[in-house]
Image (spheres, helix red, strand yellow):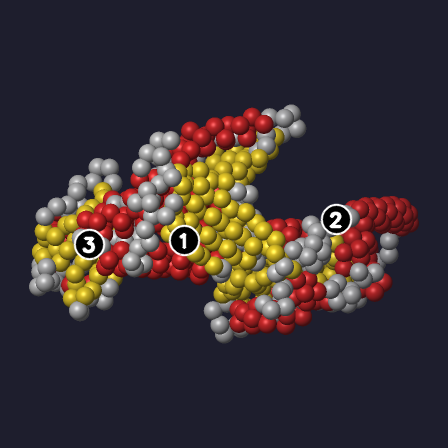
């Protein structure tokens, strides 16, 4: 029954009453029938309404993924479905009658968010948001929500409907993904040497970060959006390109690992050494689909390794080669090839320091050689003043702004970068040792130190020209950063005190993969006790929110389970929020081999210095004594050359045993081979195998030379019938074992004892006594000279 029906029904009797006063009997009966029909209609409407409410309740309760909350006009909760109870924790009995603001966070309530949402839903039809809400236990969850107005059947505003969906897990997963990306980026930024790639094989799109792209000369924008593999292959050095391409193909074909060292040419044409490591992955059908990996720039390590090899080679050449001039040219070439420059040489400077004249030079293929003299002021008005300080280095000659148009002078000889090292005498520049590059180049301190060291040694040797032999320890070259890809990462959340390590980082502390780690329980106990204080101090400085936030240190670790001592280089940085350090992220790299290599280099340099100094002292003594007692210069030089040759023979033998010892037979044989007559039986030797010390070997070699030279000139080897027998043995006496050596000349000319002892005799007696610690006698018997050596044996090695 409608309101209109009720109006007509109620109005009819009133109208009749006014017109007639009382209803007729038939009208009363009809009215009663209509009342009964209206009651039936009202009952039907009530049943329909009840059924609608039941359906509404069923729909609300069935929405298990959505919390559905209804309120009245004042925001008081009137309806609360099961999903709302599951998500927020309050039961319907607990929450109905409480304000909708109960589920909002205190800060949102203070900010008026619940009222604002209700107003917005009235003006816009709905109010959507994504925010944090409060649960019954006080915890928070993130939800996407929508508030809408509720209307009654007559269209009047009756309340509000709030629908929420819990999206906490999505938000946390997204946050963790973002944090993971941040950790990776921060770790890569902290390591500074690492680049990464990911090759989509079917689509041939290789995605790489900016550092990776830069090394291969590829536009970083293209690399980030993906570009064909060939774009990067073209950046590989031509000499390495085919090999690397073949290794990539093999890794794809076998769906396996890829690990290679090779050179690349960057955007500015510079050459870098890289160590690349990656793995090919296949789909369920076994087809290769992805090929990710990482690179480490090994240029510095390779350069250091090359310089170490060059120093060793220099020591070998400078003391073994014969012609000093040739040696210096080889040294210049050694510098040029080691540093990959275009020209290396030296020039003499006139007394007025005006001109430099080219004396000797090495040039790379395609580089024009310099000759003649050059006016120093043409290159820079301040060049001479700079040279008086010892070293002048220019990264780009075009950057010079003083002097008489210096750029053109450098351009005329094809130089864009150079290093000049001066030899100063009496405060003036006398010699300029120069290194030229045709391209701009930022000279590293290690490179300048290498040039200075090598040239100083070579120049010193060339000036003396008396040293010919010396030993360089020939240890195997270290391959620095052989496992350069072994970089681990760490992430320390200071708020939660949670420390995250990857398995490579765990390995550097001797911890098994997957093991939980903590700062106090794993990191600190894993440090070497001697390094722990300074490492903790470095961490404290890095964590100081007022500081730079940088962490760069090398410390030792002792494996917590394997007990292995390792040297670890750690680099990292911190994140500061609101004046408080909240995170500490970085990378670690095992540099044990590099640390050991540096120590070996120091030992090698000290040993080289020691050997050269000792050898030069011996050569100097021989030269002084020989030339001073020679009857003329020619005779003196011949005697000096022969004695130096004998010394060199001994050096050759000692070099083969790293100067630890020398077989006596090898010493005797190598020394006497130049004096042996055509009939070898006339000069024979025999004795048991014995090892002499390095100093004993040198002394015996010089003595054998003097005796053989005397025998050839005056003794048993000066005629056609004489012979010489050398024998040695070990005898046992009361005081222990004794080494005995006998030189005996037979059937030679009659011997007459000299009126005075010459240098050769004194050299034999004094050097042997000094080094063997025994007795040496020279017996000038008429039938032939006899030399006897007897010395106690201190050890088996003599």
What separation in Å lies between label 1 and label 3 (alpha carbons)? 26 Å
**Residue sitting nearer the eye, 563 or 267:** 563
Q: Secondary structure at mark 2?
A: loop
Task: Tell whether label 3 touches label 1 (CB within 8 Å).
Answer: no
**Residue sitting nearer the eye, 365 or 645:** 645
Which mark's residue is nearer the viewer, 2 or 1?
1
Coordinates of residue 117 in the picture (x, y in percent): 62, 61
**Residue sitting nearer the eye, 269 or 27:** 269
The answer to whether any part of residue 480 appears in the image is no
Question: Which image quadrant is residue 143 in?
Answer: bottom right
The answer to whether any part of residue 259 appears in the image is yes
Q: Secondary structure at mark 1?
A: strand
Coordinates of residue 191 in the picture (x, y in percent): 50, 54
Q: Which residue is mark 2?
A: 65
Residue 183 placement, left or right of 60: left
Q: Secondary structure at mark 3?
A: loop
431 up-or-down from 59: above or below: below
Query: Which is nearer the N-term, disc 1 or disc 3?
Result: 3
What separation in Å lies between label 3 and label 2 (alpha carbons)? 115 Å
Residue 708 placement, left or right of 77: left
Q: Which residue is mark 3?
A: 631
**Residue sitting nearer the eye, 185 or 472:** 472
Residue 687 placement, left or right of 670: right
Mark 3: few/some/many CA within 10 Å (<14, 14-19, 20+):
few
| Total marks placed | 3
Q: Which residue is mark 1?
A: 779
What separation in Å lies between label 2 and label 1 (alpha carbons)? 116 Å
Residue at figure coordinates x 64%, y 52% from the top left: 507
34 up-or-down from 149: above or below: above
């Amino acid at each position: 029954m409608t309101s209109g029906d009720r109006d007509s029904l109620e109005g009819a009797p009133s109208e009749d009453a006014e017109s007639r006063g009382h209803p007729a009997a038939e009208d009363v009966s009809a009215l009663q029938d209509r009342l009964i029909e209206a009651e039936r209609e009202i009952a039907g409407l009530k049943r329909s309404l009840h059924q609608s409410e039941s359906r509404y309740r069923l729909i609300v309760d069935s929405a298990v993924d959505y919390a559905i909350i209804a309120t009245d006009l004042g925001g008081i909760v009137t309806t609360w479905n099961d999903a709302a109870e599951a998500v927020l924790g309050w039961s319907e009995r607990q929450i109905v009658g409480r304000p909708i603001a109960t589920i909002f966070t205190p800060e949102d309530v203070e900010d008026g968010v619940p009222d604002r949402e209700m107003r917005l839903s009235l003006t816009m039809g709905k109010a959507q948001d994504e925010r944090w809400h409060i649960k019954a236990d006080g915890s928070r969850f993130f939800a996407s929500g929508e508030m809408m107005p509720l209307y009654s059947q007559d269209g009047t505003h009756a309340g509000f409907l709030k629908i929420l969906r819990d999206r906490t897990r999505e938000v946390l997963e997204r946050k963790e993904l973002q944090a993971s990306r941040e950790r990776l980026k921060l770790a890569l930024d902290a390591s500074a040497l690492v680049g990464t790639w990911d090759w989509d094989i079917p689509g041939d799109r290789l995605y790489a970060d900016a550092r990776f792209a830069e090394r291969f000369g590829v536009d970083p924008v293209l690399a980030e959006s993906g570009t064909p593999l060939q774009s990067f292959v073209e950046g590989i050095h031509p000499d390495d390109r085919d090999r690397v391409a073949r290794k990539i193909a093999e890794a794809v074909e076998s769906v396996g690992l890829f690990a290679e060292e090779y050179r690349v040419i960057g955007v500015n044409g510079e050459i870098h050494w890289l160590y690349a490591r990656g793995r090919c992955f296949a789909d369920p059908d076994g087809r290769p689909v992805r090929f990710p990996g990482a690179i480490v720039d090994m240029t510095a390590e390779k350069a250091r390794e090359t310089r170490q090899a060059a120093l060793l080679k220099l020591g070998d050449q400078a003391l073994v080669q014969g012609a000093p001039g040739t040696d210096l040219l080889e040294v210049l070439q050694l510098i040029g090839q080691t540093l990959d420059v275009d020209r290396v040489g030296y020039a003499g400077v006139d007394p007025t320091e005006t001109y430099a004249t080219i004396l000797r030079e090495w040039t790379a293929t395609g580089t024009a050689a310099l000759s003649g003299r050059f006016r120093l002021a043409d290159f820079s008005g301040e060049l001479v003043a700079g040279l008086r300080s010892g070293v002048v280095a220019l990264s780009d000659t075009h950057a010079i702004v003083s002097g008489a148009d210096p750029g053109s002078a450098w351009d005329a000889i094809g130089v864009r970068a150079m290093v000049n090292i001066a030899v100063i005498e009496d405060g003036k520049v006398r010699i300029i040792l120069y290194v030229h590059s045709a391209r701009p180049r930022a000279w590293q301190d290690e490179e300048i130190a290498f040039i200075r060291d090598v040239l100083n040694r070579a120049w010193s040797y060339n000036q003396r020209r008396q040293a010919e032999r010396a030993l360089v320890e020939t240890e195997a070259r270290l391959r620095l950063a052989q496992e350069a890809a072994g970089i681990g990462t760490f992430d320390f959340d200071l708020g939660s005190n949670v420390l995250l390590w990857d398995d490579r980082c765990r390995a550097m502390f001797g911890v098994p993969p997957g093991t939980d780690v903590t700062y106090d329980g794993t990191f600190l106990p894993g440090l070497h006790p001697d390094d722990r204080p300074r490492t903790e101090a470095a961490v404290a400085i890095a964590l100081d929110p007022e500081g730079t936030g940088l962490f760069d240190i090398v410390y030792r670790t002792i494996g917590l389970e394997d007990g292995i001592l390792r040297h670890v280089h750690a680099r990292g940085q911190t994140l500061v929020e609101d004046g408080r350090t909240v995170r500490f992220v970085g990378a670690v790299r095992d540099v044990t081999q590099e640390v050991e290599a540096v120590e070996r280099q120091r030992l090698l340099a000290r040993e080289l210095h020691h050997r050269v100094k000792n050898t030069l002292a011996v050569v100097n003594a021989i030269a002084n004594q020989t030339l001073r007692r020679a009857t003329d210069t020619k005779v003196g030089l011949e005697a000096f050359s022969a004695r130096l040759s004998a010394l060199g023979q001994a050096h050759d033998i000692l070099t083969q045993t790293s100067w630890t010892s020398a077989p006596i037979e090898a010493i005797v044989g190598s020394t006497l081979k130049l004096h042996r007559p055509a009939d070898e039986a006339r000069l024979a030797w025999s004795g048991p195998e014995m090892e002499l010390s390095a100093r004993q070997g040198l002394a015996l070699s010089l003595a054998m030379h003097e005796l053989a030279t005397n025998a050839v000139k005056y003794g048993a080897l000066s005629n056609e019938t004489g012979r010489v027998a050398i024998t040695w043995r070990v005898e046992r006496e009361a005081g222990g074992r004794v080494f005995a050596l006998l030189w005996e000349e037979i059937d030679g000319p009659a011997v007459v004892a000299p009126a005075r002892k010459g240098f050769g005799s004194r050299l034999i007696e004094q050097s042997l006594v000094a080094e063997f610690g025994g007795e040496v006698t020279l017996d000038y018997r008429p039938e032939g000279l006899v030399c006897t050596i007897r010395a106690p044996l201190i050890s088996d090695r003599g």
